[in-house]
Amino acid sequence: MREGIRELVQREALREVEAGLAAIGARGVVLKGMALALRAREAGDAIPSRATGDVDVYVESGRAPALRRHLLEQGFGGAPEARPTSTHHLAAVSTRGIQVEIHTRIAAPSWGLPEAEMLRRVRPLESARRLDTLDPEGLLLHSMVHCSQHCFSHGLRAAWDVLAVLRTGPDVDWARLAGWVKALRAPRGFWVPAAVLARELGLPLPPELVREAPRDALQRNLEAIAARRLFRVAERVDELHPVSRSAVLLLLHDSVAARARYLGALFRWALARPGRRPGLARSTPSGVGRLRQAWRHFRQYRGATRRVAADED
């Protein structure tokens, strides 16, 4: 009953978003789990979609603040003057316990997603005149990169999403997807979770696609980290120690130039970001505790990579 009520509230929030888009003369692209749920509903998929939390909608960056102001005027909760809480979305607004995140980019710019091409290939929703979703290739790419962005948290959710895309969008252009992955600044952000999920859960990804994944020592070490976290961890990205989080994301970037770009983006955001969200300090360790957590994560990483090396021998 709770899930049913939550879904009704989510639908109403999405209707409010669509009304706001009409008011400002813009279109939006529904992202993540809500996009897959809407696609499954329109396709008549007999398998229920997974539970979704927030409502994530991409809006052209020049129109996004206007949509946020409109929703606040319609009674959504949130501070009008709140600064963006991420490099790719505005501060969330909420209604009856459902958060709405208005994205100005599909994902963090450090990944280098081909967003212009992805947005040119969006597919309209029959049930919403001003809302689209990404095409199957875009949904798959975003799902895997989002999983890596969260340091391989919620792996079962990512696997469910892959299966949902394959059921409702069987016409996947695997060559295009492979080309998009190759052009990323951190292609391993796709290959690591995709390879582990395909191997461990038997996801029906084409063998020719999986064979495109790197086969070097760094890939094996990253897959060891992913295998440890994908099926055990369900946390927000900011609950992981920032040193550990940054270390994993740095490893996903292959070249020195890509790592320098990532560190530059991290530094610029650290200078521009607003204050920490209320309650965050209570949920994460500080001082000596943070150093101990980082050291524990490093020891876990070393242990996992030694086991991988021993298995290879």
Image (cartoon, rainbow, N blue to C red):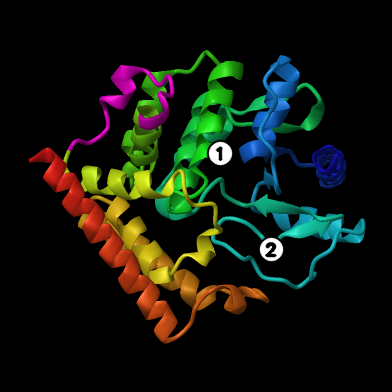
Which quarter of the figure is the C terminus placed in? top left
Left or right? Give the position of 132 relative to 107: right
Left or right? Give the position of 147 relative to 122: left
Which quarter of the figure is the N terminus placed in? top right
Magenta region, residue range: 200-215
* Label of residue 157 in the image: 1
Q: Position of residue 77 (x, y in %)?
A: 84, 63
Residue type marked 2: Ala
Q: Could you tell me which residue is drawn at 42 percent across and 78 percent down? A: 290
For the residue pair 158 and 185, the one nearer the viewer reads as 158
For the residue pair 245 and 250, the one nearer the viewer reads as 245
Q: Could you tell me which residue is drawn at 40 percent across and 21 percent down? A: 205
Q: Secondary structure at mark 1?
A: helix
Q: Quadrant of residue 25?
A: top right
* Residue under numbered circle 2: 91
For the residue pair 265 and 227, the one nearer the viewer reads as 227
**Residue 222 in the image: above or below residue 203:** below
- Please report whichever mark, 2 or 1, sits nearer to the chain's N-terminal start: 2
Q: Position of residue 10 (x, y in %)?
A: 81, 42
Q: Position of residue 155 (x, y in %)?
A: 48, 42
Sort mark 2 into few (<14), some (14-19) or many (20+) by Cα contacts within 10 Å. Answer: many
Q: Nearer the viewer, mark 2 or mark 1?
A: 1
Q: Could you tell me which residue is drawn at 47 percent across and 49 percent down? A: 232
Q: Quadrant of residue 211?
A: top left
Residue type marked 1: Arg
Res. 275 in view: no
**Residue 51 in the image: above or below residue 279:** above
Res. 158 in view: yes
Q: Secondary structure at mark 2?
A: loop
* Label of residue 52 in the image: none
Left or right? Give the position of 67 relative to 208: right
Q: Could you tell me which residue is drawn at 36 percent across and 43 percent down? A: 227
